[in-house]
């Protein structure tokens, strides 16, 4: 599993703005069993002698032996392509050393080779506090930390539910394998827990505290996720060069677009683009022990060529000149020339896709997305979380529709909470 995050307060708020975004991710690596090979006893004795002499004896030309930052076996979380990775490094006293899967396959007489058995689980949360209220920054922080605290054990139990994948026999059954519905329910429950923590804070502090959230568990080639508000999640697929939104905003503009009152261009620059219809938290008047919030949930398959992108609305709603763009578009009777002018000034999904696909690393992609938001106005805080798992199955020839299955960007202004 590789991941990267990036955050910026936004050009428009750089002088006196505050951070109202919060991002959290926890990655659990399960396995690496096929990533090891035994070394001859003579090599072990020689390695021990070098270790006793204070010399690891690692060949600097071999990234897996030397801890070269370009190697897959490094323990430096910022090394290689700058993506974070969970890995094990070899100890010269140890009889195991990391091996490139292609090298291992060649030794076995199988030039094609197989991907090493390795499963990763990620639990994540991204929140964007509502700045029009007293404590959006606190609400966002509480939301991300509470959600990940709740979901981390859920993800680990899901990972260890199938020891047979590692040819491991256990005397007693481990955790039962969860169904997608179970994991979606766990995500929803974690978000409700976060909602109650924010309400507890609001009541104790006598302050209003609201935030959006996108959260989930990625395990076994599936993304189980939920959201409240207008922070977003996307899947960017390198094999098909596509970007798919997998969330749909709980927002006034989204509701108007769904019933056909706004076209796609109007929706990008509508004057009510700061109004969301659902959020975590509140004024503290509700009983935090029984309070709840409606969490939209879904499950989608993910593949080796997918990058999961989670972002606050500061990326897609960066344009500070949105009102004038909207008025110009409507005055031009929504003609194509005016529409193209709007598309050139806002951040489009196509541009987001291109920044992710063109970047040499996830770290660079995250930084480029933040830079894109600032280039288009930098109206608000912007945060991005990206992760991918190359150990998953490849993208199938027929890629399934992964759009969200639902039941149901402007001026420099603060987000407000409206009626759902």
Image: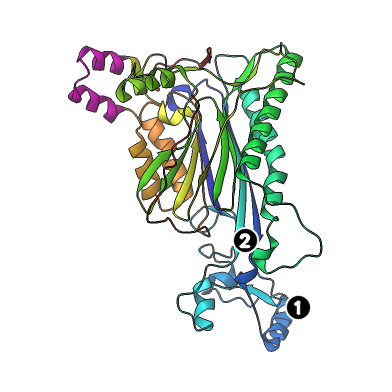
Q: Nearer the viewer, mark 1 or mark 2?
A: 2
Residue 339 lies in magenta, yes or no? Answer: yes
Q: Is residue 352 above or below residue 255?
A: below
- Give the x, y percent position of residue 154: 70, 44
- Give the x, y percent position of residue 289: 77, 21
Write down the region rendered in magenta.
324-345
Whether the residues at callouts 1 and 2 have beta carbons within 8 Å, the answer is: no
- Give the x, y percent position of residue 8: 50, 33
Residue 321 appears in view: no
Residue drawn at x 36%, y 36% as measured from the top left: 349
Residue 333 lies in magenta, yes or no? Answer: yes
Q: Is residue 341 above or below residue 418?
A: below
Residue drawn at x 34%, y 15% as measured from the top left: 323
- Give the x, y percent position of residue 295: 59, 28
Residue drawn at x 34%, y 38% as measured from the top left: 351
Residue 70 appears in view: yes
Q: Is residue 219 left or right of residue 306?
A: right
Pointer 1: residues within 10 angstroms few (<14), some, or many (20+)?
few
Residue at the right extreme? 172
Q: Which of the two labelled residues, at mark 1 and mark 2, occupies the earlier sequence position?
A: 1
Callout 1: SS: helix
Q: Is residue 213 above or below residue 118?
A: above
Q: Is residue 221 above or below residue 327?
A: below
Dot 1 corresponds to which residue? 52
Pointer 2: residues within 10 angstroms few (<14), some, or many (20+)?
some
Magenta segment, prevailing SS (helix, strand or loop): helix
Residue drawn at x 48%, y 34% as measured from the top left: 405
Quadrant into which the N terminus falls: bottom right
Callout 2: SS: loop
């Amino acid at each position: 599993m590789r991941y990267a995050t990036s955050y910026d307060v936004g050009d428009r708020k750089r002088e006196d703005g505050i951070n109202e975004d919060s991002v959290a991710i926890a990655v659990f690596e399960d396995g690496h069993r096929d990533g090891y090979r035994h070394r001859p006893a003579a090599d072990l004795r020689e390695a021990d002698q070098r270790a006793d002499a204070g010399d690891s004896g690692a060949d600097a030309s071999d990234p897996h032996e030397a801890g070269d930052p370009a190697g897959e076996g490094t323990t430096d979380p910022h090394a290689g392509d700058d993506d974070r990775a969970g890995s094990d490094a070899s100890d010269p006293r140890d009889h195991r050393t990391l091996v490139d899967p292609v090298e291992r396959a060649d030794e076995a007489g199988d030039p094609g080779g197989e991907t090493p058995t390795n499963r990763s689980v990620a639990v994540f949360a991204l929140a964007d506090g509502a700045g029009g209220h007293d404590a959006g920054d606190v609400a966002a922080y509480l939301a991300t930390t509470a959600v990940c605290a709740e979901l981390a054990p859920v993800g680990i139990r899901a990972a260890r539910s199938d020891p047979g994948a590692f040819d491991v026999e256990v005397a007693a059954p481990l955790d039962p394998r969860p169904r997608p519905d179970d994991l979606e329910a766990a995500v929803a429950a974690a978000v409700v827990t976060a909602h109650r923590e924010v309400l507890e804070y609001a009541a104790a502090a006598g302050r209003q505290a609201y935030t959006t959230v996108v959260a989930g568990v990625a395990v076994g080639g599936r993304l189980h996720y939920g959201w409240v508000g207008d922070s977003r999640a996307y899947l960017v697929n390198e094999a098909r060069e596509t970007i798919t939104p997998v969330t749909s905003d709980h927002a006034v503009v989204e509701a108007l677009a769904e019933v056909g009152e706004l076209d796609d261009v109007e929706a990008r620059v509508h004057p009510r683009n700061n109004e969301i219809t659902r959020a975590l938290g509140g004024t503290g008047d509700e009983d935090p022990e029984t309070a709840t919030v409606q969490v939209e949930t879904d499950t989608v398959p993910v593949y080796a060529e997918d990058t999961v992108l989670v972002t606050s609305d500061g990326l897609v709603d960066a344009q500070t000149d949105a009102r004038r763009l909207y008025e110009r578009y409507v005055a031009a009777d929504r003609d194509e020339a005016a529409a193209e002018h709007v598309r050139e000034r806002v951040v489009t999904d196509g541009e987001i896709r291109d920044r992710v696909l063109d970047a040499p690393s996830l770290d660079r992609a995250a930084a480029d997305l933040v830079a894109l938001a600032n280039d288009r106005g930098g109206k608000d805080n912007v945060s991005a979380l990206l992760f991918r798992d190359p150990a998953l199955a490849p993208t199938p020839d027929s890629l399934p529709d992964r759009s969200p299955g639902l039941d149901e960007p402007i001026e420099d202004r603060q987000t407000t909470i409206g009626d759902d």
